[in-house]
Image (cartoon, helix red, strand yellow):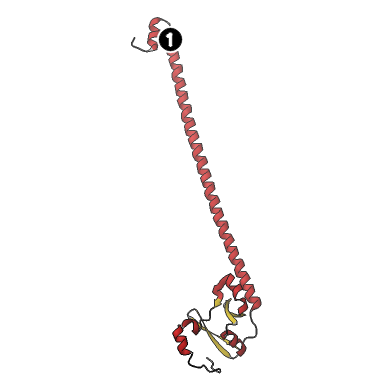
Amino acid sequence: MAGSLFDQLKKSGLVDDKRAKKVQREKQQQNKQKKANKSKKGQGGNSQNEAALLAAKAAEEKAQRDRELNQKRQQEQAEKAKHAELRQLIQSNQLKGYEGDIAYNFSDGTAVKTLKVNEKTQRGLAGEKILIVRFGKGYALISAELQEKIEQRDASVIVRNESLQTQLSKEDEDYYAKFEIPDDLIW
């Protein structure tokens, strides 16, 4: 019984050649259609899935960029608000009428600057009751009571008074304590 089922049916007389060829053609066409449908579904499904994944990924990246930009804008706005607040604080509380004949020298970074002040203001600056702050393109004088408020907003605007006491060791302080400084000494 070698041979296919078709050959066996043909020998037994149950199927004729014409009918067998017709059935075979129909079967081949069905197989071709199934393969074509599978490839279309497979390609279409994959391309749709890939497109959906790419679209979702692009949307997520865009959302992430938008969040970062929004956060950056909020930080910039907060900084602007802080600087405006600081500017208003200094402007409304700066001392007036401190001008005088006495030259008060102070260091701002590596540069030595000079302000012409009166005697009362000089004592306040020496006693650290008055602070010098950078304001605009120049300097402004404010009371030391506002130091904490200014430091909360931007501590870099305060010109620090690098006094001799902070630079000397304990031994040097003890040594220099032996010498009396005259009250009328003006730098």
Residue drawn at x 62%, y 70% as measured from the top left: 84
Image coordinates for residue 172, horizontal then vertical, percent: 45, 86
**Disc 1, SS:** helix
Q: Is residue 78 left or right of residue 172?
A: right
Q: Is residue 91 left or right of residue 111?
A: right
Kind of residue sitting beneath label 1: Lys
Quick check: 53 above or below 70? above
Question: What is the quadrant of residue 73 in the picture?
Answer: bottom right
Q: Residue furthest top?
A: 13
Location of residue 120 by image quarter: bottom right
For the point 52% across and 47% down, the residue is 58
Where is residue 146 drawn, in percent x and y?
Answer: 62, 76
Residue 57 location (% of width, % of height): 51, 45
Q: Total of numbered circles in the picture?
A: 1
Pick the front one: 75 or 41: 75
- The quadrant of the rendering that contains the N terminus is top left
User: Please, is residue 119 above or below residue 50 in the view?
Assistant: below
Q: Given the current orientation, which residue lies at the most extreme right position?
A: 92
Foreground residue among 167 and 11? 167
The residue carrying pointer 1 sits among few (fewer than 14), some (14 to 19) or many (20 or more) residues within 10 Å by Cα, namely few
The quarter of the displayed image where residue 11 is located: top left
Q: Which residue is mark 1?
A: 18
Q: Residue at x 47, y 87 (%)?
A: 174
Q: Position of residue 94 (x, y in %)?
A: 63, 79
**In front: 118, or 46?**
118
